Image: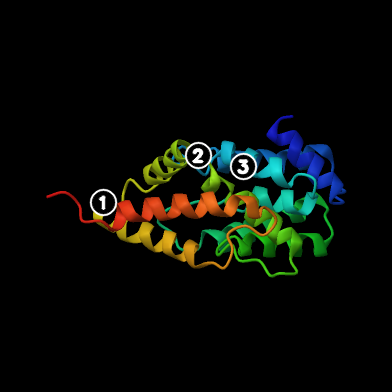
Amino acid sequence: MSLEARFVDSARQAGATATDIALRAVAAELTARWSEPHRSYHNPAHLRAVLDEVSHDPIAALAAWGHDAIYDPRSPANEERSAQLLASLLSRCGLPSETIFKAYHLVLMTAGHAPDDSDHRGQLLADADLAILATPWPDYQSYVDAVRAEYAHVPPELWRIGRAAVLSNLLELPALFRLHPEREESARANLARELATLTEDPPA
């Protein structure tokens, strides 16, 4: 199923009353954003991977579409801006305001990947978004390389400092995965292994 068709399907399941033409137009706008040339990791492949894990929950799927809809490596407000954009686009789909509100807050949650214990839908989306962390080391390295390419404008030393802070924050979370605890050990091993390469003294 194409990405566009997946969006339309999720929107319909969530209660969208707009025409198929209107839904496809929203899907096309979101797909265009996910396909921007500066995206090496936060691209349609990542979107598909997240959707594969959350598509049984249409609201989580709509939030997945929005969670990196705006991705500017120079901006500290991507999640907030993405949530606002998604809410605006979903309002064109004829969705209930409560559904839009839920999707909006799910996108905001992805800024810290720390959903409440009672937030099953948030846990579902957070687990899917972080699934790459638990992949075998070669795949994890490819992910890191892709993210580094998105931050090509950042000098090496500043990248080391910033990336180390991101990894440390993730490792400080009580749990990276709520619904997939079997991923925890391998994800933490990958994060710690990468962090070690960033904090060791660079070669002279």
Farthest-out residue, left? 204
Give the left or right position of residue 198, taking residue 120 as reference.
left
The residue at the point 55 percent across, 63 percent down is 111
> Can you give x and y, in whole percent of width and height, for residue 14 in the image?
84, 51
Residue position for label 3:
47
Give the Cα separation between the discs numbered 3 and 2: 20 Å
Looking at the rendered structure, the kind of residue marked 3 is: Leu
Give the Cα separation between the discs numbered 2 and 1: 25 Å
Residue position for label 1:
156
Q: In which quarter of the image is residue 55?
A: top right
Residue position for label 2:
136
User: Closest to the observer: 110 or 18?
Assistant: 110
Secondary element at image label 2: loop
- Who comes first in sequence, dot 3 or dot 1? 3
Looking at the rendered structure, the kind of residue marked 2 is: Pro
The answer to whether the residue labelled 2 contacts the one labelled 1, judged by CB atoms less than 8 Å apart, is: no
Which mark, by number, is residue 187? none
